[in-house]
Image (cartoon, rainbow, N blue to C red):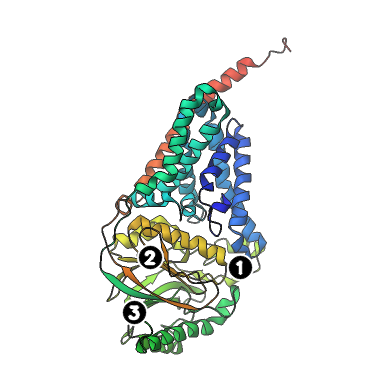
């Protein structure tokens, strides 16, 4: 499972991993199934989330990984619970595997503290044909397809189906697995409209990676100002095309430009030089000490900040951007008090610029289905993910880019990711990546983005495919209850009596 995700990208191993876990939990006791799932979860999440150890220390990394692994423990328990059902009707294995994985992710994406969707099966499929299913049912449908393909593989590989009489059914399962893995290539991805807008993304870079990027905020802002002014000079010299919008990443200005005149002056100079609006990521302070907001601000070249086009991050990250249970967390890490109290916004990130309406999401928000969808239903013509990977590493950046690729397909909107340090890139509506930058280097990239287009079925359906899958998963688990009771009763009847012993 691990190597199916970026930076490895062996997407075809994800169904194999689903099959192996399903086989390992089949016919186990419930505690055994939960234990196998937990071990699998640790083997997956500990290395997948290793980037959280770059600055946060090993204990928060292990605690987060263990918390995520617990959900795979529940998945293993569910797999063991359904053993009688699979023994009787092996043909149901693809359906149940797909449903259980969607239900597990639906729970993990929401709890606790708003959930943590990192490591969803759908996010491993950036280069897979299955990515195209996102246009029909979003990330949940892609996860279902991968899970179902894994279920078909385990049903095919189970020893009874190797007997000669099982080969017709085995051939059917092989065809099912092949269709689920490769069949989505036949799904038509939404075609974008013909109109284009030239957009520039600025990756200013930071002096040093790590948690102290905040102490370098003046240098980081200056990096983005100078890169934009250089772009303006290239435009005047004919070396670059004139953009219609410039986008800076999250934390491009950690000095509040609405309160600090020096920061405002530098941003205004960059906007004036390039002659078009800049959508910049900034940290805004309030009158309450320690209270901040993570924002995307549209800065006009003449009039300055347009507070009517201001997006406040709706889903701050717990234990990173705000600190629940602070006294307890202080025991875990001495870096707890570096975390301020980030206040969440309450409106979708729909930013209307003179050139194009942008669906703005900030950093980890790209992992949450509803937050991205709300921008498209609000009128977004392109998607923009402003992020800051300076506190992590390249593996985390590439995992995040995989999410952007899925969102572009899901909503039929071209997308971009712009980071302080990389990876920054543009993404087409088929999930293809354009003009990707390197990591921990400065860069400025321009791209003609196709705008608007019809809303996809996934956008129109919203959360209903996921809700349907969760409801069906619950029904399947309930339906297995009588079969488990009969198996227990049969096992008790087979036990020898005391006299027989």
Q: Is residue 278 above or below residue 118?
A: below
Location of residue 99 by image quarter: top left
Task: Give the CA distance from mark 2 to mark 3.
Answer: 16 Å
- Identify residue for label 3: 243
- Identify residue for label 2: 415
**Whether residue 458 is visible:** yes
**Whether residue 95 is visible:** no
List x then y, in percent, for residue 210.
Answer: 60, 73
List x then y, in percent, for residue 60.
Answer: 62, 60
Task: Give the CA distance from mark 2 to mark 1.
Answer: 34 Å
Location of residue 375 by image quarter: bottom left
- Identify residue for label 1: 336
Q: Earlier in the sequence, mark 3 or mark 1?
A: 3
Q: Residues within 10 Å of mark 2 (few under 14, many from 20)?
A: many
Q: Earlier in the sequence, mark 2 or mark 1?
A: 1
Residue 175 or residue 57, whichever sits in front: 175
Q: Secondary structure at mark 3?
A: loop
- Could you tell me which residue is drawn at 36 percent across and 45 percent down? 465
- Could you tell me which residue is drawn at 26 percent across and 63 percent down? 193
Q: Earlier in the sequence, mark 2 or mark 3?
A: 3
Q: Is residue 71 left or right of residue 453?
A: right
């Amino acid at each position: 499972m691990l190597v199916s995700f970026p930076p490895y990208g062996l997407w075809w191993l994800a169904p194999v991993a689903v099959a192996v876990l399903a086989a390992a939990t089949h016919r186990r006791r419930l505690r055994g199934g939960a234990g196998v799932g937990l071990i699998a979860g640790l083997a997956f999440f500990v290395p997948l989330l290793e980037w959280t150890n770059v600055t946060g220390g090993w204990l928060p990394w292990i605690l987060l990984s263990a918390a995520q692994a617990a959900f795979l423990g529940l998945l293993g328990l569910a797999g063991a619970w359904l053993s009688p059902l699979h023994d009787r009707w092996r043909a149901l294995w693809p359906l149940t595997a797909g449903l259980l994985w969607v239900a597990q992710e639906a729970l993990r994406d929401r709890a606790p503290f708003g959930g943590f969707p990192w490591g969803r099966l759908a996010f491993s499929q950036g280069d897979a044909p299955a990515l195209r299913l996102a246009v029909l049912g979003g990330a949940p449908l892609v996860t279902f397809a991968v899970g179902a393909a894994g279920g078909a593989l385990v049903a095919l590989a189970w020893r009874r189906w190797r007997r000669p009489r099982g080969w017709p059914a085995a051939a059917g399962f092989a065809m099912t697995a092949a269709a689920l893995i490769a069949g989505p290539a036949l799904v038509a991805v939404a075609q974008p409209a013909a109109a284009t807008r030239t957009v520039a993304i600025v990756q200013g870079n930071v002096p040093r990676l790590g948690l102290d990027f905040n102490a370098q905020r003046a240098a980081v802002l200056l990096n983005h100002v100078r890169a934009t002014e250089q772009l303006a000079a290239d435009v005047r010299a004919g070396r670059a095309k004139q953009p219609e919008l410039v986008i800076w990443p999250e934390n491009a200005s950690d000095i509040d430009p609405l309160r600090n005149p020096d920061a405002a002056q530098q941003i205004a100079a960059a906007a004036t030089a390039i002659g078009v609006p800049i959508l910049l990521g900034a940290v805004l302070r309030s009158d309450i000490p320690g209270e901040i907001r993570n924002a995307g601000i549209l800065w006009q070249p003449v009039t300055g900040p347009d507070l009517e086009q201001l997006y406040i991050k709706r889903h701050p990250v717990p234990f990173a951007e705000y600190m629940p249970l602070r006294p307890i967390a202080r025991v875990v890490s001495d870096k707890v008090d570096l975390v301020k109290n980030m206040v969440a916004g309450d409106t979708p990130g729909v930013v209307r610029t003179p050139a194009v309406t942008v669906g703005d999401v900030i950093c980890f928000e790209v992992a949450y289905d509803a937050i991205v969808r709300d921008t498209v239903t609000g009128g977004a013509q392109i998607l923009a993910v402003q992020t800051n990977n300076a506190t992590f590493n390249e593996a985390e950046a590439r995992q995040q880019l995989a999410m952007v690729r899925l969102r572009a397909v899901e909503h039929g909107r071209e997308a971009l990711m712009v980071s302080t340090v990389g990876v920054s890139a543009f993404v087409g509506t088929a999930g293809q990546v354009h003009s990707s930058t390197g990591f921990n280097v400065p860069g400025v990239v321009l791209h003609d983005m196709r705008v608007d287009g019809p809303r996809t079925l996934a956008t129109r359906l919203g959360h209903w495919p996921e809700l349907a899958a969760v409801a069906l998963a619950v029904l399947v688990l309930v339906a297995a209850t009588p079969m488990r009771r009969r198996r227990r009763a049969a096992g008790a009847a087979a036990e020898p009596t005391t006299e027989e012993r």
